[in-house]
Amino acid sequence: MAKRTAVMVLLLVCGMVFVIVGTPQGGTKSADPSVLLQADEAFDRARAEHGAEGFASFLADDIVTIRPNQPLVRGKKDFLAGWNYSPEMSVRWKPEFARISDDATMGFTTGSYKATLTENGAPKVAATGRYITIWARQPDGSWKAVFDSGVQDKAPAPPAPAETKKP
C-alpha cells in the first residue's frame, strides 16, 4: 500500500511539473532541455567521484522529497540524513528525458538508476528503478535539485521450480 501511495504521489508531482513547465498560451518553446540533462549527468558524476559531498553540492538548501512511511522531508540536512553513504554501496543514474520552462528557470529530468552493493569484493545489483528530479536555476546560473525522488523496480519473480517427470 505504501509503495502504491508513493507511486501515486510521484505521478501527481510529475503532473504538476508538466503544468509548471508547460508552454504558456501563445508561447513558443525556446529553452533547451539539454542543459538539464547535462546538469543531471554532472550530478551523477559528482556523486560517483566525491560521494556524499558531491551529491550534496547539487541539492538546493530547501530540497523536498517523499519517502515511504515518512512525512514529507524538507531541507538539505534532513534529506541527507536519510541517505546511506556506505563505501560498499554505489548508486548511478542515467537521465533519459528533460523538460524545461520557457523562461529556463525550472525543469525536470527523469531516468533510471542502479544501486550496486559490493560484498566480499564482488559487486551485485541491489536495486534498480526510476527517478524524477525537479531543478531550479539559481541566481548564479547553476541548477540545483529542489525535489528528488524515485521508485524502486519490483524484484524479479523467482524462477518456477522445474517439473520432474515420473518414469
Image: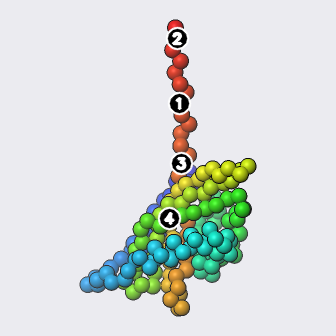
Nearer-N-terminus badge (1/4): 4
Mark closer to the observer (4, 3): 4
| Residue plotted at (53% across, 25% down) | 162
Which residue in the structure is indicated by mark 1? 160
Label 4 amino acid? Lys
| Residue plotted at (52% across, 21% down) | 163
Label 3 amino acid? Lys
Label 2 amino acid? Lys
Badge 1 density bin: few <14, some 14–19, many ≥20, Cα 10 Å:
few
Q: CA distance from mark 4 to mark 3?
A: 19 Å
Q: CA distance from mark 1 to mark 2?
A: 18 Å
Q: CA distance from mark 4 to mark 2?
A: 50 Å
Nearer-N-terminus badge (3/2): 3
Q: x, y (%) of residue 65?
A: 58, 69
Mark closer to the observer (3, 1): 1
Which residue in the structure is indicated by mark 2? 166
Identify the disc placed on residue 94. 4
View extreme (bottom): residue? 139
| Residue plotted at (51% across, 73% down) | 40
| Residue plotted at (67% across, 70% down) | 51
Q: Report if residue 150 is visible in the image.
A: no
Q: x, y (%) of residue 110?
A: 46, 66
